[in-house]
Amino acid sequence: MVVQALAFYLFAAMTVASAVMVITAKNPVHSVLFLVLAFFNVAGLFVLLGAEFLAMLLVVVYCGAVTVLFLFVVMMLDINFVELRQGFLQYMPLGATIGIILLAEIAVVAGGWHFAPEAAKAAAAPIPAIETMTNTHALGAIIYTDYVYLFQSAGLILLVGMIGAIVLTHRKRAGVRRQVIADQVNVNVADVAEFKKVETGKGV
């Protein structure tokens, strides 16, 4: 028990310290590397809790794919953060509108429990004993019953991150040519191609 307690406090302290460095580091590449360190320490905490599936998922999916993608995007975009902060107020009304719409949808979903009493009975249906369930099945039963709102909130956070990555990659920059799909689809063939009828035996 002493070893487990020491390991828990070690992983927890490193996780908190890494999380703080993620949001305080001035270099975005350093922030991503501290994020990797935080993921590894959280995976250690999951192992201590007996959730090996979550630990493996965190290391393989997040450290092995998502964080590498973050690092690749940060290093390839050459983002000017000073310029991005200058246009913050310009997009404030649109962001506030989208936030209000999302809050209204969450309120509608939360209010649905009052208008559909049978939903609470369905959610309270008995589940198999923990001893008869695998680690993955028990995790799914807990996530989609007791922590369904937190799970949906995590999905919204990932959606915001995805939209942010799209906005950063599609921003306008001087000297960079962009592909316009509509112009390519509506192009006139006569303007870009010339057809010649070559007689037999007189071709090149």
Image: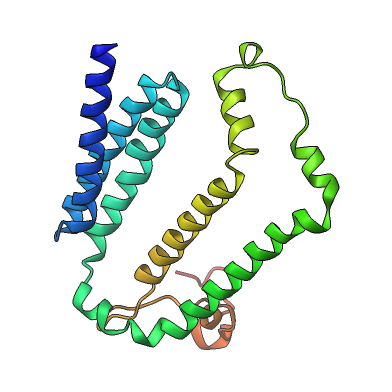
- 7 with respect to 183 (left or right): left
- 55 with respect to 74 (left or right): right
Give residue 144's position: percent from left, percent from top.
63, 39
> Which quarter shows the C terminus?
bottom left
Relative to the observer, which residue lies in front, 108 or 179?
108
Relative to the observer, which residue lies in front, 19 or 4?
4
**Residue in the picture at 26% in, 45% down:** 35
Q: How many marks?
A: 0
Quadrant of res 187: bottom right
Quadrant of res 33: top left
Q: How is the image coloured?
A: rainbow
- 70 with respect to 30 (left or right): right
Give residue 47's position: percent from left, percent from top.
37, 21
User: Quick check: 44 above or below 169?
Assistant: above
> Which quarter shows the N terminus?
top left
**Residue in the picture at 31% in, 52% down:** 70
Give residue 86's position: percent from left, percent from top.
26, 84
Relative to the observer, which residue lies in front, 70 or 16?
16
Quadrant of res 132: top right
User: Quick check: 197 above or below 54?
Assistant: below
Give residue 34's position: percent from left, percent from top.
21, 45
User: Quick check: 168 above or below 61?
Assistant: below
